[in-house]
Structures are given as structure tokens and as C-alpha cells.
Amino acid sequence: MTAIASAPTSPLRYSELVVADPPVVLAPMAGITNQAFRRLCRESMAPELDAGQAGGLFVSEMITTRALVERNRKTMDLIRFTEHETPRSIQLYGVDPAVVGTAVRMIVEDDLADHVDLNFGCPVPKVTRKGGGSALPWRIGLFDDIVRAAVREARGAVPVTVKMRVGIDADHVTFREAGLRAQDAGVAHVALHGRTAQEFYGGHADWSRIAELVELLDIPVLGNGDIWEADDALRMVRETGCAGVVVGRGCLGRPWLFADLAAAFAGRSERTRPDLRTVAATMRRHAELLSGWMGEQHGVTDFRKHVAWYLKGFRVGGGLRAAMATSSSLAELEDNLARLDLDQPFPTDVLGLPRGRTSGGRAVSLPEGWLDSRASRAVPAGAETDHGGG
Ligand SMILES: Cc1cc2nc3c(=O)[nH]c(=O)nc-3n(C[C@H](O)[C@H](O)[C@H](O)COP(=O)(O)O)c2cc1C
């Protein structure tokens, strides 16, 4: 392995409490970045977790602002942090400036989080069809109203950041104007995923868009898209000049990627290559943490989606894989883990390969007449129903 020189980045300081050092953010991922997974990633990056050692930012999955202000029970569970988690970072999804403002006020008054990120990147048809997520910045006045409401209600007590895509499609690019508006509104950073909604998760993220935004804005710009290995993060910083990176799918089944990111940003060349015994121990801990948070039955069921990611590239028979992915108790999972051939070294041939969602190239569903006007500040109806993020 060749040593790659450390990229010239500094810690990101948002407030006394919110510091990303190294400047690395765990991307919000619905159904994934709950308190169990955030803890695994954080511990990899900063093993002295309990001593409150600094690390990156580990963002919750997206939280619908309407459900939050209604104090929906499931939503309140999603934003429960353990006492170890500092800073606490919540991503909000909303389309109504008044509701987003109320949600942020509630976060500040009830001391629910230390950092709020706003989701303008979701490309899921259920969301864009209603004018939410990555469709919203096209209505730039509405975007402006939402971001300003969030920053106003944060009252300087919690930093507010924005996460977005390049635009709806190649003909409806929004990131430049939205970035400028967000900066004027007073956000602490803008994170850009270098794909349009139309590209979904296909092809490659266009990092040149990130470089363009870095040139355009005075506030920190974070780059997102296709960081599969720690050295990809350094390359993104070098190629775009971004102030930090947001890492999503690369850590699916590999929370230890955050240890590699810490090493990479410190200029160290060592990388984590766990054998199957160590991976199995991480799997067990992941399932235990989920069980501790949501109860054993739900926790073990929720863990099933992670099995194939953890085992990617290892020699494991189809029957055992299937048994593992249908385990319904910690004891059953434990039995199945014990049946693995645990002495296998890490399969280096899977390094750098995509994981998770990879499909792309779909027409973007939008509300009738959405593209005809950029000026309308009208709040789209029905865009805050329950949905998965993206
Ligand atoms: C399963 C899954 C769920 C996601 N949920 C969210 C979300 O709740 N909020 C959000 O802003 N982005 C969400 N995303 C997008 C990621 O945060 C990230 O922008 C995207 O995956 C690109 O980064 P990557 O190439 O590092 O994965 C999700 C992505 C995946 C794969």
C-alpha cells in the first residue's frame, strides 16, 4: 500500500460543541444511520468515545418535520441519542417553512440536538412527485423561505447546514443558486452530492460540480458521492478543494471505514482489513446495539438488511447467508455466526466496489407544472407523508 499524503484540511468548527475533526460526516441514510450504526461508526473513528474525544459528525436518518412537531412516537424514538453521543446531529426533511421553523424551534427549546441538517437531496419518486427533496430547490423562493426559517429559529444556538444534489436533471440544475441562497441565509456549510435526481444512484458522481461550488461560495462546501475507500476521500479533497467529505454507502457493512478515514486525514497509511472473525464480532455488536435500542425482535429483524453488506466478498454458502438474513433472535444469529469459516482474511477484491443502491437513469416524477415556474413560494401539498430517504 502506498502512503498518500494527508489532504490539506482543517477541522470544521461550527460551534463550541459541534466540531468535525477530521472534517468527515456520516451521511444521513434512512433506515441505516440510527443510534446503533452511528455508534459503530463513531467508535471506529474515535475509540475513546466515552471520554468525549472529538470525531466527525454522525447524522441521524432524515426526520420529517411535520411528524416531529406532532411529536409522533416513532419519530421521537428516531431522535433518541445515547448519553455518549456528542454532538447530536439531526437531519430534517420538510417543505413548509412554518413547519420547518417550528421543528427547529422545538429542537432548540427542548435541547434535542446540537446540529441540524436540511435535506434537499432526496430523489425518491414518492418525494419529488410532491415537490419535496431534490425537486424543491427549483422553487428557489420556497427553498429560501425554508432555509431562512430554519436559521432564524435556530437562533444561533445550533448550526444549520444544507445537503443537496446538483439539480433535477441536466436541464434543470439548481446547486449554484441554491448554494448562494443558503449561504446568504446563514447556513454553516453546504454539502453537495454530485448527481442530479434523474441520475438517482447510477453512473458516477460528478465531482467537478463540487469544485464549482467551492469556487462560488465563501462558506465551507462538503463533497458527497462515491467515496468507497478512505483514499477516495483524500482524492475528493484534492480534486475539488472541498472543506470536508460526506460518506454514505461506502460504510454499509463496513463501519470501520471511519477508522480508515481518521487515519487518512491524519496522513497515516494503515487501513483496516478485518478477517471474518472480526467482522462477525462487529455484526454481533451491531445486532446487539439495535436490539438495545428497539428491542431484540425488531433489532434482529432490522439487522437482516446489513448481512449481505458485511459478508460481501467472503466465502459463505448461500444457505448460511440466507439463514443469517432471516435470523429472528440474537441467539439464532449467534449460532449462525459460529457456523462461518471465521479464519478468512478480508477479501481485498471488493475494495472500491459500490455497495447499496446503484441504480440510475430514471425520469423524475414532479408535480404538474412544477418546472414552469421557479418563482412560486406555494407550499406543495402532501409532500411530508411518511417515506424512506435518499
Ligand atoms: C439507503 C439510503 C438512504 C438514504 N437516506 C438519506 C436521507 O435520509 N437523507 C439524505 O439527505 N440522504 C439520504 N441518502 C443519500 C446519502 O446521504 C448520500 O447523499 C448518497 O448515498 C451519496 O453518497 P455516497 O455515494 O457516499 O453513498 C440515502 C442513501 C441511501 C443509500
Image: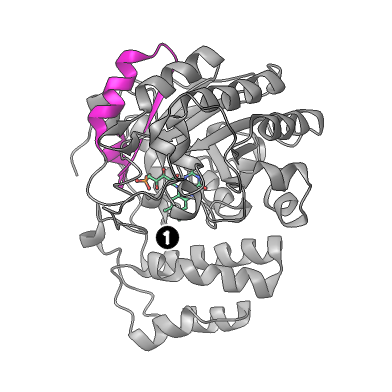
Magenta residues (range): 206-235
Element at badge 1? loop
Give the vertical position of 90 relative to 291 (above or below): above
Q: Nearer the viewer, residue 336 or 115?
A: 115
Locate residue 251 relative to residue 388 in the image: left or right.
left
Q: Position of residue 375 (x, y in %)?
A: 47, 23
Image quarter for residue 9? top left
Q: Nearer the viewer, residue 336 or 199?
A: 199
Q: Residue at x 67, y 41 (%)?
A: 65
Q: Residue at x 65, y 23 (%)?
A: 149
The stretch drawn in magenta includes residue 122:
no
Q: Position of residue 213 (x, y in %)?
A: 33, 21
Image quarter for residue 311? bottom left
Q: Quadrant of the N terminus?
A: top left
Locate residue 362 relative to residue 330 in the image: left or right.
left
Which residue in the structure is indicated by mark 1?
Answer: 253
Q: Position of residue 281 (x, y in %)?
A: 50, 66
Can I make out residue 366 in this image? yes
Q: Residues within 10 Å of mark 1 (few under 14, many from 20)?
A: many
Q: Position of residue 305 (x, y in %)?
A: 48, 68
Give the vertical position of 50 relative to 299 (above or below): above
